[in-house]
Amino acid sequence: TIAFLNGDYLPLAEARISPMDRGFLFGDGIYEVIPTLQGKPIGFNAHMARMRQGLEMLEISSPFPADYWRAVVNSLLTKNNELLQSESVGIYIQISRGADATRSHAYPDDLTPTLFAFAFATPPPPVPDASKVKGLHVALGEDKRWQRCNIKSTSLLGNVMHFEQGKREGKQEIILFNRHKEISEASSSNVFIVSNGVIKTPPLDHQILPGITRKLVIECLVKEGILVEETVLPLAELLAAEEVWLTSSSKEIAPVIEIEGKPVGNGKVGKIWQQAIEAFNQHKFNF
Ligand code: PMP
């Protein structure tokens, strides 16, 4: 694999960063995963906008515009063209505050951010056919993460621990709820439900990552004249929902058929999911 590090392309196995990098010491950085299909990025501009906002929130100044990163994405795809055989390739981009001689908590002045990116094969997107798609089995847990989940920070320990919690219960993801028993998101995806025929997802706030797939799914559905309500979702409404979906760049829209061993709706992949994935496939390259 050829990776990108601070402006250079080199074999991933030879890429080196300082142990004093604040990304390593503090998780002080942000990242993106941009999905590509047959070499075409999905939601590239939205990923760039979220990355810029993350840098602003952390006060990391990195002068490289979206065009610079588009060139990096294209170079990683060409330099790793054996990956394109898998059709679906994720591009990971990380920007940390940089390496410093001390380990002071304060943001040091004038650090040069560390830029890193690499490409990796991802599972193919779901086929848009409810009878052929396997639904996910998920766990439930109280969200124990911090109050800044809107930042796509590399400090992912809370998410990692939650994912592991789900995995040890034999589940593929874990849906999280806050202390008021309202759904936030899953450990690495956003949550949608269909409740009495209405598609709903929690509103954007500090409790969830503003998922790009979440945004594109809402916009694709609107183009088809189907509205999504961004509203608080009580846990009880999730458990009574006809359908539950998880969205992320790598999963697109994944139907959930079982939560903590209990079937969602009739326990089969739903009809509205099928409409949603068709709308997504129709429009996903147009953002
Ligand atoms: N929430 C969390 C906590 C995530 O880590 C992710 C990304 N894996 C998502 C939601 C989905 O975001 P996106 O659609 O931008 O991949």
Image (cartoon, rainbow, N blue to C red):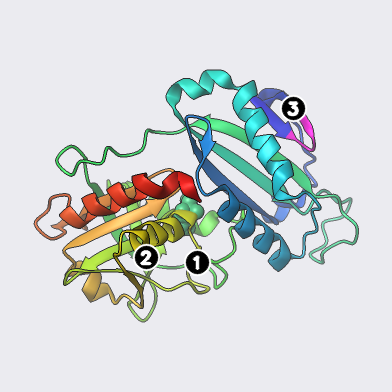
Amino acid residing under circle 2: Leu
Alpha carbon separation for disc pair 1 and 3? 35 Å
In this picture, residue 249 sits left or right of residue 118? left
Task: Identify the residue position indicated by label 3 in the image.
Answer: 9
Q: Are marks 2 and 1 in contact (CB under 8 Å)?
A: yes
* Local SS, label 2: strand
Q: Is 8 included in the stretch rendered in magenta?
A: yes
Alpha carbon separation for disc pair 2 and 1? 10 Å
| Foreground disc of the pair 2, 3 | 3
The region drawn magenta spans 5-9
Q: Are marks 2 and 3 in contact (CB under 8 Å)?
A: no
Task: Identify the residue position indicated by label 1 in the image.
Answer: 145
Q: Are marks 1 and 3 in contact (CB under 8 Å)?
A: no
Measured as percent of width and height from the top left, residue 255 is found at 25, 51
Crowd tier of the residue under label 3, counting other residues whose Cα lies within 10 Å: few below 14, some 14–19, many 20 or above: some
Task: Identify the residue position indicated by label 2 in the image.
Answer: 176
